[in-house]
Image (cartoon, rainbow, N blue to C red):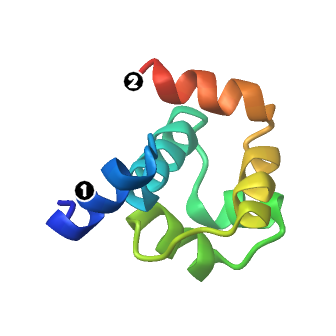
Amino acid sequence: MSTNKDSNIKTEFGLKFDAKDIGRHITKLRMQQKMTRYRLALCSGIRESVLMQTEKGAREPRLNTVLKIIAGLDLTIADFFSRFNSK
């Protein structure tokens, strides 16, 4: 559940997605590919704990981390975000 502060930040800066949205999307894509967190972390070259925190929305993922996860999912950046919009 997003806090009021998170909603204000999204509105104020015109952001379309927040950390929790991105985390849920990554989880959905990982599950569609029947990948474990361990496997995606391994394919992405990141620690499993970083992936877990990212999926839970507990941390704002760095751009580099998101790019590694996208590569680990074997998606292009455009495909990742186009699928994001087709919730």
Corner quadrant of residue 62: bottom right
Indicate which disc residue 7 carries: 1
**Furthest-front residue in this view:** 12
Residue at position x 78%, y 50% in the image = 72
Amino acid type for the residue under numbered disc 2: Lys
Indicate which disc residue 69 carries: none
**Furthest-top residue in this view:** 86
Q: Nearer the viewer, residue 28 or 21?
A: 21
Q: Residues within 10 Å of mark 1 (few under 14, many from 20)?
A: few
Residue at position x 73%, y 61% in the image = 63
User: Who comes first in sequence, dot 2 or dot 1?
Assistant: 1
Instruction: Name the residue tied to disc 2.
Output: 87
Amino acid type for the residue under numbered disc 1: Ser
| Cα separation between marks 2 and 1 | 19 Å
> Which mark is in front, 2 or 1?
1
Q: Residues within 10 Å of mark 2 (few under 14, many from 20)?
A: few
Considering only vertical position in the picture, is 77 above or below 50?
above
Considering only vertical position in the picture, is 29 above or below 6?
above
In screen coordinates, is 21 left or right of 54? left
Residue 58 in the image, given as x and y percentages of width and height:
40, 75
Residue 65 in the image, given as x and y percentages of width and height:
73, 65
In screen coordinates, is 77 left or right of 80? right
Considering only vertical position in the picture, is 36 above or below 82?
below
Q: Nearer the viewer, residue 74 or 61?
A: 61
